[in-house]
Amino acid sequence: MWKDFKEFALKGSLIDLAIGVIIGTQFNNVVQSLVKDIIMPPFGLIINRVNFTELFIALNGNKYPNLAAAQAAGAPTINIGVFINTIITFLIVAFALFLLVKQINRMRRQPAKETNTKLCPYCLSTIPLKATRCPQCTSDLEAPASQRLSEAARS
């Protein structure tokens, strides 16, 4: 049983998942700090010096100077500012992941497309690869090398 567990725990995909969770957690901390410490203060200043983390509604009807005081008094609160910060954090994380996935998809190799057509050297219309005469301009085209070889073998 220990051997099976050790084999499971040391599989590459499990270790990759653990590393992804750790990096994701740290990325979340960075984004939360970005929103809380960099983005929201100037935004609050623009809209009349509002500190979004202090936007709340006390459901018991009392007035409190800040969210911490309301929570210390045990008042039920609707924390609008915290919710706004969470929404902005989510949007930044979603956008960052979108950019990451877009770059990863761009780096993946695109399969080579097999073409079944070619251009007529005379009229530049698209014609089947094996065509020996252009259906548009009726020019004689050079037969494909494989067809010439098979014809030579028959002679």
Image (cartoon, rainbow, N blue to C red):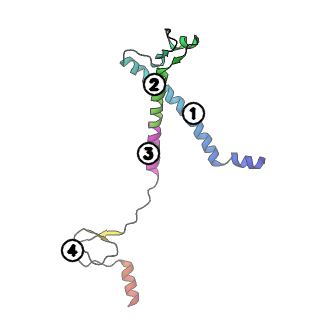
Image point (38%, 17%), residue name? 45
Residue 35, placed above or below residue 76: below
* Residue at the spot of label 4: 137
Mark nearer the N terminus (3 vs 4): 3
Residue shown at the point (39%, 83%) measured from the top left: 149
Query: Considering the numbered disc 3 on the image, is that residue within a helix, a strand or a loop?
Result: helix
Furthest-bottom residue in this view: 155
Q: Is residue 134 left or right of residue 44?
A: left
Q: Position of residue 105 (x, y in %)?
A: 45, 49
Q: Which is nearer the eye, 80 or 25?
A: 80
Which mark's residue is nearer the viewer, 2 or 3?
2
Q: Nearer the viewer, mark 2 or mark 1?
A: 2
The residue at which mark 2 appears reads as 84
Q: Which residue is mark 1?
A: 25
Looking at the rendering, the stretch of residues picked out in magenta corresponds to 95-112
Above or below, comparing residue 6 to residue 126 in the picture: above
Mark 4 Cα-neighbour bin, 10 Å: few <14, some 14–19, many ≥20? few
Please report whichever mark, 4 or 2, sits nearer to the chain's N-terminal start: 2
Q: In 3D space, how far apart are the residues under numbered discs 3 and 4 (Cα atoms)? A: 44 Å
